[in-house]
Image (cartoon, rainbow, N blue to C red):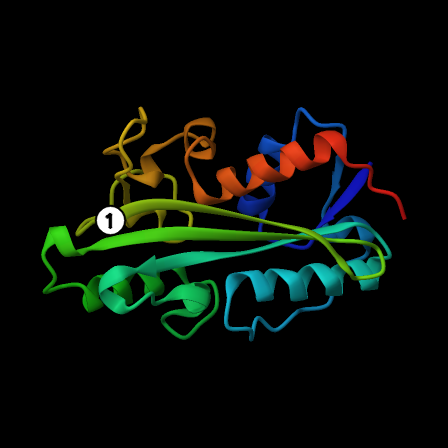
């Protein structure tokens, strides 16, 4: 089974590949199908944006397509940056600027009130663009005052995982190796649901 991943982000592709490595699904990047058109992420929810990207990629390529939309919701900021996580500071994909704005917004907020969660919405589209399935994962934590860890990926250097009962508790996402992170991350949890689905589903045209 072949599955097109509607993302050009190499770090995101690596995470998905790691999680689905034991399935019989062969993953394709946009470059494997001649590229995909840019999709404006203008919806109000992660799920709606994921749907839009998956449908666009499927109709463009004629293949089963997986897309995600994910981001950070900070309690004190009323859920911001939310769907604007990648462009919180104004320029899409400027992780350093996004993190600096986040720290500035929370500069006067005490540690106990810096709660946050990562959310990942995955949408799986059929070749005709219709949505076959949706999956969602969340990870709770809080925002650190200073960066921790050396694995740069979005807001990871400032996100401390706080859910109880896991070996990763009390460690920053940027301190976890890929295998450790996939076990508790928002994307890992959504991908686990996807993996369970793919174990029994048949991706027919």
Residue furthest right as drawn: 205
Image coords of residue 89 (percent x, y): 36, 71
Residue at 34% over, 51% down: 117
Q: Is residue 44 above or below residue 183?
A: below
- Few, some or many residues within 10 Å of mark 1 (<14, 14–19, 20+): many
Image coords of residue 82 (percent x, y): 40, 65
Q: Nearer the viewer, residue 125 or 2?
A: 125
Q: Quadrant of the N terminus?
A: top right
Q: Is residue 11 above or below residue 110?
A: above
Q: Nearer the viewer, residue 201 or 141?
A: 201
Asked if residue 30 lies left or right of residue 16, the reply is right
Residue at 31% over, 24% down: 167
- Residue labelled with disc 1: 142
Quadrant in the rendering for residue 78:
bottom left
Tag 1's secondary structure? Answer: strand
Image coords of residue 124 (percent x, y): 70, 51
Q: Nearer the viewer, residue 151 or 20?
A: 20
Image coords of residue 67 (percent x, y): 64, 54
State how many labels appear.
Answer: 1
Asked if residue 163 lies left or right of residue 36, the reply is left
For the question of whether residue 23 can be seen, the reply is yes
For the question of whether residue 36 can be seen, the reply is no
Residue at 28% over, 45% down: 141
Residue at 65% over, 62% down: 51
């Amino acid at each position: 089974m072949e599955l097109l991943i509607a993302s050009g982000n190499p770090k995101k592709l690596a995470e998905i590949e790691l999680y689905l490595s034991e399935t019989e699904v062969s993953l394709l990047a946009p470059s494997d199908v001649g590229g995909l058109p840019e999709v404006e992420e203008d919806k109000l929810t992660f799920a709606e944006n994921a749907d839009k990207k998956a449908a666009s990629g499927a109709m463009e390529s004629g293949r089963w397509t997986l897309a995600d939309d994910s981001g950070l919701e900070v309690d004190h900021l009323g859920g911001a940056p939310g769907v604007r996580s990648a462009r919180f500071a104004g320029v899409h994909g400027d992780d350093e600027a996004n993190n600096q704005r986040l720290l500035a917004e929370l500069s006067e907020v005490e540690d106990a009130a810096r709660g946050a969660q990562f959310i990942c919405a995955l949408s799986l589209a059929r070749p005709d663009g219709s949505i076959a399935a949706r999956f969602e994962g969340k990870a709770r934590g809080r925002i650190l005052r200073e960066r921790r860890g050396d694995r740069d990926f979005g807001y990871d250097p400032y996100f401390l995982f706080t859910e109880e009962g896991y070996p990763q508790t009390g460690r920053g996402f940027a301190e976890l190796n890929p295998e450790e992170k996939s076990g508790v991350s928002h994307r890992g949890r959504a991908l686990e649901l996807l993996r369970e689905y793919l174990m029994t589903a048949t991706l027919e045209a």
